[in-house]
Image (spheres, helix red, strand yellow):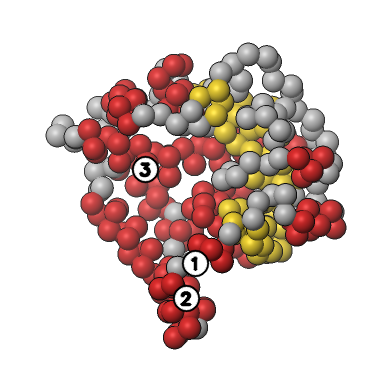
Amino acid sequence: MGIILNKDLMNGGKIYLKRLQDEGYILKSAILVDFDSRKKEGSKKKLVKKIIGGKNADKLINLKNRKNIIKSKNEEKYFTNIISYYEKLDDVFFDNFNIHDYCQEIVEMPLKDFSDEKFINFLSASDIKNYIYLGGKIFRGKVLNMGINFIHSHPGAVPDVRGADCFLWSILYKNKLGYSTFYINDGIDTGDVILKKEFSLPIFKTPSDFSDNDYFKFYKYILNFYDLQKRAEILTEGIKKIVDADYDYIGIQQEEGGRQYYFAQPELIIYGMKKICV
């Protein structure tokens, strides 16, 4: 089994890999996808690389990112329910993380999108038929017709809650959280289900003087830490079902109906966060 990671979403990837390793799974391959990497690299970064070299420039950027995260941790120290989990992952998020500890093979791949022939050819030559995918871009067309399973963990109980901001929509419309692991198809969160679970709403203690802006910021922390932890939990349980079935678990076709949601407005985000904060 392998994993496809968008380099822009590595925090989530690290949480997934740590959870899988804790449950005894070391993946065969990790594909680190960098979309339009040459376009994204700014002139300042190019200059720094030219002066001190590429590896040193990357170390400097990682150090800067680390300081920003530490600053955020100090500023938001009252988010104890989330940050306490984050503290346990210091070695994963910061300097001690080494992806080679979690995967046997690492492949870095700059791509335009998943229709890129470089990506198609790599998958065709590989003997891996199951890849975990955290998200970031959508699979379309040829890549979904190669006999390869792409496995995704979604923050909503499908088919009822599909699309974007589903952690929030689950709170607002179901008054509980839901998570689903499924095989990706050409729809929006409509693939065959491997595992689905629902949970009562978590309650977070927040200061009495919390402003609307604090609630909005809190939502980002929820998505970056708590939500990813739950997604990794459900993913790992789903992977166990696949492994126990000797990689021949086909999943359960979703029922018709449900609803696709879209990114929520700030007012709804604030309202939703107030439902889980005391």
Q: Amino acid at mark 3?
A: Tyr
Residue at which label 2 appears: 46
Location of residue 171 with respect to 114 vertically, above or below: above
Task: Work out whether mark 1 precedes mark 3 in sequence or the reverse, and give the earlier one.
Answer: 1
Q: Secondary structure at mark 1?
A: loop
Q: Say few, some or many: other residues with alpha carbon within 10 Å of mark 1 (under 14 / 14 to 19 / 20 or more).
A: few
Eye-nearest disc, 1 or 3: 1
Location of residue 178 with respect to 149 vertically, above or below: above
Residue at which label 1 appears: 41
Q: CA distance from mark 3 to mark 2?
A: 31 Å
Q: Is residue 151 left or right of residue 43?
A: right
Question: Which residue lies most toward the bottom here?
Answer: 51
Front position in the image: 155 or 260:
260
- Quadrant in which the C terminus is drawn: top left
Question: Which residue lies most toward the left here?
Answer: 209
Q: Position of residue 91 (x, y in %)?
A: 46, 61
